[in-house]
Amino acid sequence: MARRPLPHILRNGGGSIVRGREVARTAAAGATDVLHPLITVARGLGRLAAGARRKWSGTPKDRRGPLLFLVASVLLVVVLTPYGPVTAAAALMAAAAWTGRDGSARRSAGAPDEEQAERLRTLYEALVPYFSAAEDPAPLYAHGGDWQGPFEAHEFDDTGRVSRLVLRYPAYFTDGQAESRARVEQLLHAKAGRGREYRFVWDEEANRLTLEVLPPLPEDITAQSFVTAPGETVLGFTDSTEVPRTLPLGEGEEGRDVPPVVWRTGARSTEPHLLALGSPGTGTSTLLRCVALQALRHGDVLIVDGGAAGEYACLTGRNGVVAVECSPAGARASLEWAARETERRLIAANRARQSGLPVPEDTRRPLWIVVDRPAALGHLAAAEGGGDPQALLQVPLRHGRAAHVTVVVAEHLESAEALSEAVRQHTRARVLLGPASVAQLTAVLGAAPRTTPPTLVPPGRGYARLGAGPVLRLQVPATPDPYDETAEETHRGAVLELLPPRAAGTPAASATAASTTASTTASTAPADDAVNEVAEPPEVAGVPAVDIVKDPRSLDEPGIPAEVTEPATPARAEL
């Protein structure tokens, strides 16, 4: 069979194909050189637009209005200024040309030094077993490969350690499994440097992983009157990128705005009750004191101190404080009253709605039940032969939202198993303070945080999750016991300023009034021994004179102790 001849272009046109390719390549290079300024400016405009979009997305909603007003004012000034639009356009083109310059030149200008390059190479080699597969013909991660390919962006701090890293990973990596992501995060945490907190952001759609070093949360914020609406309680403060709201602080002459973790309670709240866990000394009592001080601004508070350490003695006898109980018998009586009060509010509100009348005011005033260490209280009650006081929390926990009753429980982490089933089921707002592992955080909060939990944390530092929301870093405001002499004087003074005045008829109020009256009488009465003898209050069985109050029912009886005439029982306290 005769072979068919080759086409003419293939017989003697091989050189023509090569010359055609060279001509096309030369033309493309020439067009690129001619249009290079336009390409650079267009690339810069795109990067500036992307940066403005990120800035707008990161701006809190309460600041977007002033930002728009500022931009509009600048544009108006530019338009009204002679040659303003031309100057602004020239400045914009210059900024776009500088921003859109060649990426390789920008990378070479900020190229890492030898030590930083070695750190990045170590990270790359450590990630090879996780981001490579034997079946991959062109692996993105391979031993001895180039780390500059998958590492798209990197930043270092003053100490030479990685502070931010953006890397690509292959599409077959199982980024949808929590176990696979946890292994990679643990590796990066160990190789990038321990002792810091990292945030990991997985972009599963683009196969990108961003590692960022988080700054420490402020520890110098003290308890104060936060600018909140009724029904809002500030649990602490978190990162500015996690919440779209800030609160002003009145510290010093120049205040500052910080992002808070706000817990909303009331009839429309989805998380009406709170559970705080932590190891001893991590700040759970501090959190409860901070919550109680904020609750006293708009409601009444009943406190049950299971630890009986006197952490809430500063609230005894204050306006709005129903009772502060430490003993099992007193705690049981107080919680029984709280259960009956919850039922009374429900019945009163139901009758008012059936009659077409507004709900009574006394049923709408918030009532807070603060219980610290109920497990220890239940152990003491069992030793005395009584029932567990936690069982009395079932009614307020189940029907508290409709009755405007909020329950706040704090317990040590090692005693969390002693909490009743009602407390576990109805406390959807959770706080975990102190050092904890990822497994413990997941068990308490229901989800793992996107940050690496540190091993050493200050008091009041932990994580919070409100219902089905994200897990947030949390720093509780410094709210120490004002009677604790080991605490800082400024923090103690801030708490004392927030305490409401003492209620009339309490022993402390009577003592203050008696001391004030005695000092006034001593300064105004003449120096006569007989008068001084008559002015001295009587003493009964070694009871100090300032603790004795006359019984108003009988003027003929001698003075009797105030604790006898004014028993602090919740059954007599009316809201």
Image: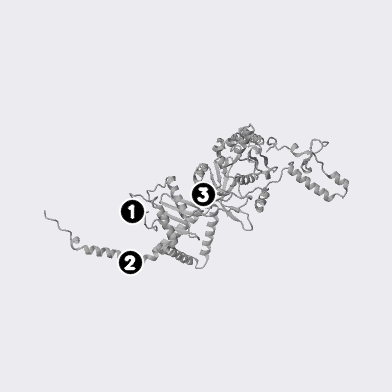
Tell me: 47 left or right of 138: right
Q: Residue furthest bottom?
A: 83
Q: Amino acid at mark 3?
A: Pro
User: Is the residue 120 above or below the residue 551 in the image?
Assistant: below
The local secondary structure at tag 3 comes to: loop
User: Which-is-in-front pick, marks 1 and 3?
Assistant: 3
Residue found 64% across the figure and 58% down from its top: 253
Q: Position of residue 388 (x, y in %)?
A: 61, 34
Q: Amino acid at mark 1?
A: Ala
Type of amino acid under label 2: Gly
- The answer, for residue 343, to whether it is visible in the render is no
Query: Is residue 253 placed above or below 424 in the rendered structure?
Result: below
As helix, strand or loop, the secondary structure at mark 2 comes to helix
Q: Quick check: marks 1 and 3 in contact, CB under 8 Å?
A: no
Query: Which mark, residue 453?
Result: 3
Residue on which the image places disc 1: 138
Q: Is the residue marked by circle 1 packed among few (<14), some (14-19), or many (20+) residues within 10 Å?
A: few
Numbered mark located on residue 30 in the image: 2
Residue under the point 53% across and 48% down = 472
- What is the CA distance from the residue labelled 2 to the residue labelled 3? 55 Å
1 or 2: mark nearer the eye: 1
Figure quadrant of residue 383: top right
User: Most extreme residue toward the top, as rendered?
Assistant: 385
> From this viewpoint, which residue is outermost toward the left?
1
Q: Which of pointers 1 and 2 lies earlier in the amino acid sequence?
A: 2
Mark 1 to mark 2 CA distance (whole Å): 33 Å
**Mark 1 element type:** loop
Closer to us: 221 or 258:
221
